[in-house]
Amino acid sequence: MADPASTHASTPEGATAVLVFADGHVAYGRGFGATGEAVGELCFNTSMTGYQEVMTDPSYAGQVVCFTFPHIGNVGTNSEDVEGAVDSALGCVVREDVTDPSNFRSMGDFPEWMKAKGKIGIAGLDTRALTRRIRIQGAPNVVIAHNPDGQFDIDALVAKAAAWSGLEGLDLAKDVSREISEGWTGGHWMLGSGYDEPGADGRPHVVAMDFGAKDNIFRNLVRAGAKVTVVPAEASYDEIMALKPDGVFLSNGPGDPAATGVYAVPVIKALLDADVPLFGICLGHQMLALAAGAKTAKMFQGHRGANHPVQRVGGIWGETEGLVEITSMNHGFAVDGETLPEGVIETHKSLFDGTNCGIAITGKKAFGVQYHPEASPGPMDSFYLFEKFVGELG
């Protein structure tokens, strides 16, 4: 269903879901998944595959995902492609109605999976038009609502969207993090056998701070040769050091890095002072930059997709200097490259808009990247980062 010209037109025939913007704009469609309503930020993702991974990535907490690829749900869902067990995306917007799945790995269809997970879906919207709106006006606050009866109090939903404070200044990491420390055992996935569980004997020990981590990050650390223990986002320096880490990993996660950094950055600074090797991804990269003295900022529309070209820069890569990696990204905040202090090198930059995508701290075994190397869009363009980190711990 196309967006209506009037912001408060009567519900079109057959509409069972609505997307309401804080400015009063209303888009009607056909609902699927859970019923009810949720308020958050609308973002778009350009990936052609991996919708289940996107919907279970804790980095999407507080957000509604508009998929630009029209056929979402056609390969169904399964238990192996879940990235996190905690709250993540609130819901999604898709162009075409979800059809029956057609994939040998499918264990269930997407609408029923969305319903079981409490996530709201709306189909029949012009997702490319919504994406263009976000690109021009920035990521808006919205309410997504699904009611099989097609009855909606639009004025109340507009007020709810307008009253939401947004993601800036919001710490969501503590809401999606593990509550207790635990060892990670799952390793590399193989068709027909699933995830293996390699032994941990003799492997360097990586303590991973969970700010809303994707499980595949831990699998890649294990694949690169590490033993992994995952700790909560609010773990203290003393708690981390008591585990005798050879290195510390700083995970991805949702929300504003400056807000999460209130409690996490002092810990990261202490780890830097103790010369503990560090590797950060996405939110972890941003907080490593904050700990080093740089600043972060909210982006106008963010980067979300599996086709983002990133170039190696900084004069540290030898014969691979200038090489371009095809990366997966999911972030609405970024490190301000203009604020990098002396001793912090920009190691990667986006070829879409020139924003910072990586740093390294001179004199330390500490580096981070804005993108998601574990998502393997290249497919193996960025696995070297896990090998670099783990390889320096032995």
Image (cartoon, grey):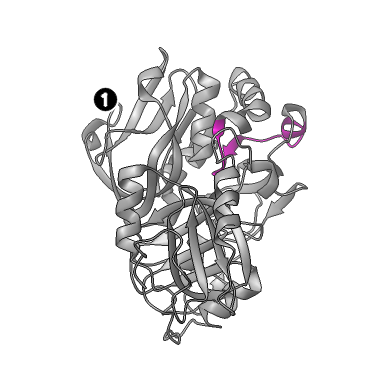
Q: Secondary structure at mark 1?
A: loop
Q: Which quarter of the rendering shows the C terminus?
A: top right
The reply, left or right, for residue 320 in relation to residue 298 is left
Closest to the observer, 88 or 229: 88
Residue 368: horizontal and vertical position, in percent?
A: 46, 34
Closest to the observer, 168 or 260: 168
Q: Is residue 141 above or below residue 216?
A: above
Which of the 4 quarters of the picture holds residue 380? bottom left
Closest to the observer, 14 or 83: 14
| Residue at the top extreme, as displayed | 342
The residue located at (43%, 52%) in the rendering is 43
Residue 175: horizontal and vertical position, in percent?
A: 69, 46
Q: Circle 1 is placed at which residue position?
A: 315
The residue located at (47%, 22%) in the rendering is 295
Q: Is residue 199 above or below residue 118?
A: above
**Is residue 256 rendered magenta in the image?**
yes
Closest to the observer, 377 or 329: 329
- Magenta residue span: 239-257
Residue 326: horizontal and vertical position, in percent?
A: 29, 50
Which of the 4 quarters of the picture holds residue 255? top right
Q: Estimate how packed mark 1 is, as few (under 14), some (14 to 19) or many (20 or more) residues with alpha carbons within 10 Å.
A: few
**Is residue 265 rendered magenta in the image?**
no
Q: Amino acid at mark 1?
A: Gly
Q: Which quarter of the rendering shows the N terminus?
A: bottom left
Q: How many marks?
A: 1
The reply, left or right, for residue 112 in relation to residue 44 is right
Q: Is residue 168 above or below residue 179?
A: above
Which of the 4 quarters of the picture holds residue 85? bottom right
